[in-house]
Image (cartoon, rainbow, N blue to C red):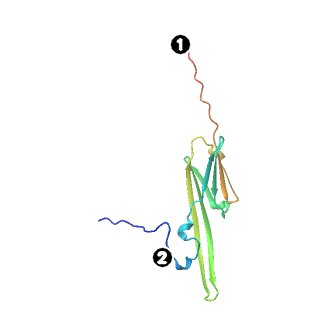
Amino acid sequence: MTLVKFNHRTMFPTFADRLFNGDPFTMAESRSNHDRSCVPAVNVRETDAAFEVEIVAPGRQRNDFKVKLQEQVLSISGDKKTEGESKDVQSKYSRKEFSIEHFERSFSLPENIQEDQIKAAYEAGVLKLVIPKKEAEQAPQPRIIDIL
């Protein structure tokens, strides 16, 4: 007999799931901790000169991102730490919650890119990367050899 791990978590939790399986103090919050680990949307555009990657990640700082290129794979990750605080003056109860939002996206790049010329900038909630392409090398023209 083999034991199989069964996860009955549904994509859309019901009120009863939240009541009996979750933290009853956070039921009123709009998002649960399970929903906080979302992956930001990405746009990838190819032009004649470069690839342009845009990642929508509002509310973050430039230092929250890590961009790494290794063996033609571009990896973009981000961490955001938040602190919440809730106080009830009548019962002198205080609660502090910490959360860390993490994402990572990876893209396989073609061989015709200039690895040392990649530029990244974070502005208005969008991380933009420009990955320039190498100029296409002209194939040598065939040489006609005369037959003697």
Q: Residue at x 56, y 77 (%)?
A: 26
Residue 100 falls in image quadrant: bottom right
Residue 140, given in percent of the width and then of the height, sits at 60, 27
**Residue extending furthest top?**
148
Q: How many marks?
A: 2
**Disc nearer the start of the sequence (1/2):** 2
Badge 2 density bin: few <14, some 14–19, many ≥20, Cα 10 Å: few
In this picture, residue 89 sits left or right of residue 106:
right
Q: Which residue matches tag 2?
A: 16
The amino acid pointed to by label 2 is: Ala
Residue 103, given in percent of the width and then of the height, sits at 57, 60
Residue 95, given in percent of the width and then of the height, sits at 59, 80
Q: Which residue matches tag 1?
A: 147
Mark 1 falls on what kind of element? Answer: loop
Q: Quadrant of the N terminus?
A: bottom left
Q: Residue at x 59, y 72 (%)?
A: 30
Which of the numbered marks, if any, corresponds to residue 41?
A: none
Spatial CA span between label 1 and label 2: 88 Å
**Residue extending furthest left?**
1
The amino acid pointed to by label 1 is: Ile
**Residue extending furthest bottom?**
90
Badge 1 density bin: few <14, some 14–19, many ≥20, Cα 10 Å: few
Q: Residue at x 67, y 62 (%)?
A: 61
